[in-house]
Amino acid sequence: MFVGVDVGGTNTDAVLMDGAQLVNAVKLPTTGDVTSGIISALTALLARLPAGARVDAVMVGTTHFTNALLEQRNLSPTAVVRLALPATQLLPPAVDWPAELEAALGGHTYMVGGGHEFDGREIAPLDRGELRRVAADMRSEGVTAVAVSGVFSPVNAAHEREAAAIIREESPEVRICLSHENGRMGLLERENAAALNAALGRLAEEVIESIKEALESLDVDAPLYVSQNDGTLMDAEFAARFPAFAISSGPTNSMRGAAWLSGVRDGIVVDVGGTSTDVGALVNGFPREAAVAVELAGVRTNFRMPDMVSIPLGGGTVVRTEPFGMGPESVGYRLTEEALVFGGSTLTATDLAAADGRAIVGNPQLVEGLDPSLVRLGMSEVTSRVETAIDQVKLTYEDVPVILAGGGSILLNNTLRGASQVLRPEHAGMANAIGAAIAQVGGQVERVYSLEEVSREEAIANCSAAAKARAAAAGAEPSSIEVVDIDEVPLTYVPSSATRVRVKAVGNLAQRQQAS
């Protein structure tokens, strides 16, 4: 049996799955510190574990790391070391960062000789002496995490690896993140991705250790996995190294769960929570990934992130009457305390849905006095915003299947413009936790090849092997790993017939194979 846990802004959901069967489910309010909410949900769920049953794996999708970046809390003093001189001096590290976030990390940036051209040739030799001076300065400044980035390091990572070895010699205790392991092509975005990942490292270790301790206290002897941004899983050790890979795990879990519950492989998922609504496209059962840089806490990155539209609309969205307005404020996890229908004093979107008869929650008598014109206006506004988001996500003018997920989906009716059909699968309110429980393990690699040096087939085979190896390192059973996506993009304005190849591979959990 597998336990899936997903933390949202309003609720923390947990499910117990026996293969394709949902055995039990728990929905509790998300707590301010997140971890205690996870522990409470696990405790409540495992209290219902059938006699003689055992848990084979626990999968968690968490908002810990998103919250840390947005709130600029629990971040490690982090330095960025770029291997690039004499190139890239015009745009130094952290050039486009919000001042508050840069200050939260300490503002330590360095540029050192090194880096490579797009075809793997050196821009300049690695300046080892300067690296040692930089390492000494970082140590004196109290830096505990370092992001090392080199120009075109996904093509040739030799300088990044050697720089890491030198820094580790000088400061064995420092946490080091290499940009070629964190992001894709694009120096600034990949460098930013590595820096955010490095800054989250200490927090990731603490969070994962606290969840492991909770599982141990509950007598659960099962491996822990964390949901990734692309709808796959990584084991706890891998997650401690790459916590930023879990930043968008919540929406992707919902999309994977919605695909699994509905049987729809290609369509649109509308996941309505208590605070926000996420709308994204399914392609072959996985979230479609963003093809451009994605901003996290105001920083441009090129992590693997879902191509989604998020709007500030959910069950806890605050409704104003004079003049009319909805959000972006939300009562969030305090919905059951503050909404009118639950005896509170705040008018929310859930109150309007209850007054309209769309939702049967709380005490409907408490909202019978709402102005019918206000209710109609509010419900029309909800529908309009969601339909606009669906239109933004669609890549075709044709109507497509739309799957509703999340507890806040009670705000919507069964007719939406742009939808060929509107599906409400059974247990859709728990789609996020189910998506975590049924997820596979994935690995993705992006590299640039010169087709004058290798054939197209050799390039794809090499990149595919690296993606499969990364999936295995993240916890997949090697014999089950298969390539599910290959993307090739010729690079214009450069010689050597350069082509960027990106490969995604997925496989079943190694633990699942052992348990079967």
Image (tube, rainbow, N blue to C red):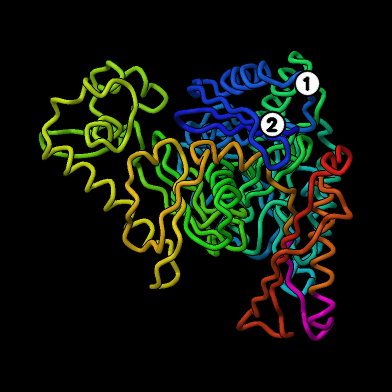
Instruction: Give the left or right position of residue 465, taking residue 91 as reference.
Output: right
Whether tag 2 and tag 1 are in contact, CB under 8 A, the answer is yes
Judged left or right of residue 509, residue 208 is: left
Label 1 sits on residue = 220
Q: Is residue 316 left or right of residue 142?
A: left
**Residue 7 seen from this side:** yes
158 relative to 250 in the view: left or right: right
Residue at image coords 50%, 61%: 267
Which residue is depicted at the point 75% across and 23% down? Answer: 212
Residue 433 at x, y = what percent? Answer: 59, 36
Pick the quarter of the image with the N terminus.
top right
Percent position (x, y) of residue 202? 69, 29
Ranked by sequence position, the earlier of labels 2 and 1 is 2
Front-most of residues 89 and 509: 509
- Asked if one can make out residue 137 in the rendered structure from this viewpoint, the answer is no
Which is more toward the observer, 153 or 389? 389
Residue at image location 78% in from the left, 47% down from the top: 131
Residue receiving disc 2: 3
Q: Which residues are magenta?
A: 445-459
- Secondary element type, mark 2: strand
SS for dot 1: loop
Instruction: Tell me which amino acid carries mark 2.
Output: Val
Quarter the C terminus occupies: top right
Instruction: Return the x and y of residue 301 as percentages of the image width and height.
Output: 56, 53
